[in-house]
Image (tube, helix red, strand yellow):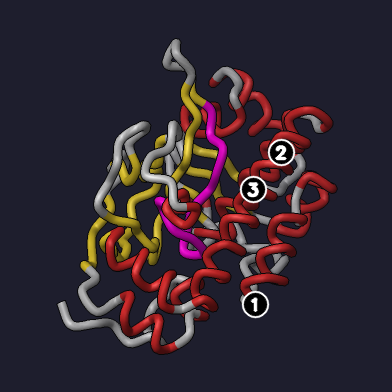
Amino acid sequence: MAAPNQHDVHNLLLKVLPTDAFDMLLADAQAVQLPARHVLVEADQPHEHVCFLEDGLASMVAVNGEDEAVEVGHIGYEGMAGAHIVLKTDTTPNRTFIQVAGSGLQVSVERFRRVTTEFPDAHTLFLNYVHCSDIQLAQSALANGRYNMHERLARWLLMCHDRLNGGDLPLTHEFLALMLGVRRSGVTNELHVIEGLRAIRSTRANVRILDRERLEEIAGGSYGIPEREYERLIGLPIRRPTHPIAEPPAANRRV
């Protein structure tokens, strides 16, 4: 493929790269479609590419010896899959796969390492992104220990809303249960609670954000710190504006 123009890419990390670093990094990049469940990083296995998401949503999950899993990171157009490569680590016990289908730009690990070696500013940018991912994980741990389930759920919905276009989040209850580390039935109940507060409308395999401002009120202090840190260090906003989204007429609602 022809190297993409920096002004045309959606990925925020790529947008703020120094021009020379961008040109080198994307010289042999591959545009890839990312279907749901596609694995970007397999646990404990070296891989040949890092992927900068252009759209869609990826989840990084931690898995124990009994195959129990919980999400430990959100990745959308603000980030990259394979960020452990920035830390000069070949493998990670975490697994990253696509939850909401999208697309991305795939770069060889060899070229990525060359760029971070030759361009210190690019290396600093990617290290700052890893730091922001660590803050996201730390705030998830805080939310799990100090906030109620409906507050935690509101936080995760806001994070998904930040990374996906439009007001519809094509998220199954099973995925939300994985994100929160709870049973599916518990997620269903908490969705009904938030729906009763008129912040969302939940249907099968979809959550529609009706009132983002209200959803942020429900999430309270559990949401916002990683997003502000990203904006401080990366220099571009990730949070979506707070304004109500009109609910479609009953005849057009998903069932």
Q: Residue furthest left?
A: 1
Which secondary structure dominates the residues rendered in magenta? strand
Secondary element type, mark 2: helix
Residue at mark 3: 134
Residue at mark 2: 194
Q: Nearer the viewer, residue 170 or 96?
A: 96
Q: Is residue 177 left or right of residue 147?
A: left
For the N terminus, the image quarter is bottom left
The magenta segment is 70-82
Which residue sits at x=45%, y=34%? Answer: 94
Marks 2/1 in contact by CB < 8 Å: the verdict is no
**237, above or below 196, in the image:** below
Q: Is residue 109 left or right of residue 84?
A: left
Which residue sits at x=44%, y=58%? Answer: 80
Residue 182, position in %: x, y? 60, 21
**24, above or below 212, in the image:** below
Secondary element type, mark 3: helix
Residue at mark 1: 235
Residue 54, position in %: x, y? 38, 66
Residue 44, position in %: x, y? 36, 32
Residue 48, position in %: x, y? 24, 52
Q: Is residue 155 left or right of residue 247?
A: right
Q: Nearer the viewer, residue 107 or 223?
A: 107
Q: CA distance from mark 1 to mark 3?
A: 18 Å
Q: Is residue 31 left or right of residue 146?
A: left
